[in-house]
Image (cartoon, rainbow, N blue to C red):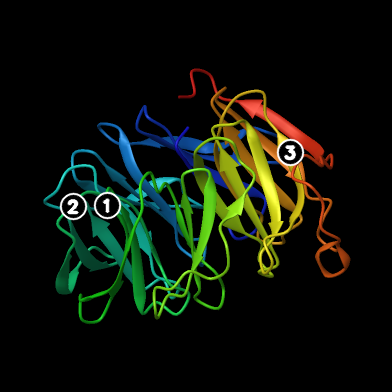
Amino acid sequence: MRWLEYLPDGRCVVTGSRDGTVRVWNLESGKQEGTSTKHEGEISGLAVTWGGTKIISSGCNGKIKTWDVELHKLVKEWSHPESCPMISISPDDRLVAVGTKNMGIYTVEGIRVNHSIKVGVIVWLMCFSPNGNKLACRTEDGISVYNVASGTVILGLGGDRVFDVLWSHDSRLFASDGSTIHCWNSDTGKQIGHPWRGHISIICSLSLSPDGSILASTSWDTAVHFRNATTGDPIGRLQHDKGVNTVRFSPSGEFVVSTGWDGKIYVWRVPWLNSVTHQVASPFNCVLTPALICRFKQDNLP
């Protein structure tokens, strides 16, 4: 399973799989809600509107589809001229960035607005800044940050094997690179502090708690690490049996959901919510045990 997003009520998550299906899962029962919605081919991107009423997914055939969360049905479809486009929704639910080498800026209704953002290389992930003014793109060359209004590049940060980027709530840019996490000033491009180490393999997903205090990271090394988002000090970790693809904090910050190479969805209660303000530095091999709330698997889930 490649794509995973929480719905704002915290009760359900949305998944996108290689078989082209988009599904809504109830985390209390572990069962699917409604019917599956499907692309003609593999899904290349998935996003949920901040209001939680719509799911927007992109397919490798360039089709962009908008699904109604409550009705579980397709309400809008349009096309982007590139195959396998990534997507990101602005925090005000007004704009959708879509593209692979050229980012088209659309309304959520699929109407093209303004200009294209010409990246020139393949974009593997992108995300709007919290204020909606900037768009960070993770490319094969590293990370580029663009001004959404003008389409001009603001920053270019090199780096090999960058798998994820994440804006902090104050618009400072976090970037994972190899087995370390780098923090960057999004205005100057200067690195903030030293790289945060601990994973022994490639970092592939980052998530920030709703209050901005805890950063979670996943890796092919089978672990999810939790850190103080200000200092980088380790707080604890949870362990999968196999590599971990994605991690997401719940809207309340009380839970995290993670997915692994075993095709399962894991729901964990986070035991460190109140620990950040009084924590002491601990070695990365310190393991705190979160409560596993539930674990479920879809048949043939990729």
Tell me the tag on residue 141: 1
Contact (CB < 8 A) between labels 1 and 2? yes
Do residues under tags 1 and 3 come within 8 Å of each other at their CB atoms? no
| Foreground pick, 68 / 137 | 137
Q: Position of residue 122 (x, y in %)?
A: 22, 49
For image coordinates 67% across by 69% down, the residue present is: 230
Residue of label 2:
121
Is residue 46 visible from the viewing direction of this image?
yes
- Count of labels in the image: 3
Write the residue at 30% across / 32% down: 42
Q: Which residue is mark 3?
A: 238
The percent position of residue 202, horizontal first and vertical second, equals 49, 38
The mark closer to the camera, 1 or 2, is 1
Packing grade of label 3 (10 A; few <14, some 14-19, many >=20) is: some
Q: Type of residue at label 3?
A: Leu
Q: Is 210 or 283 nearer to us in this picture?
A: 283
Q: Amino acid at mark 1?
A: Asp
Picture layout, residue 83 above or below residue 149: above
Q: CA distance from mark 2 to mark 3?
A: 35 Å
Q: Amino acid at mark 2?
A: Val
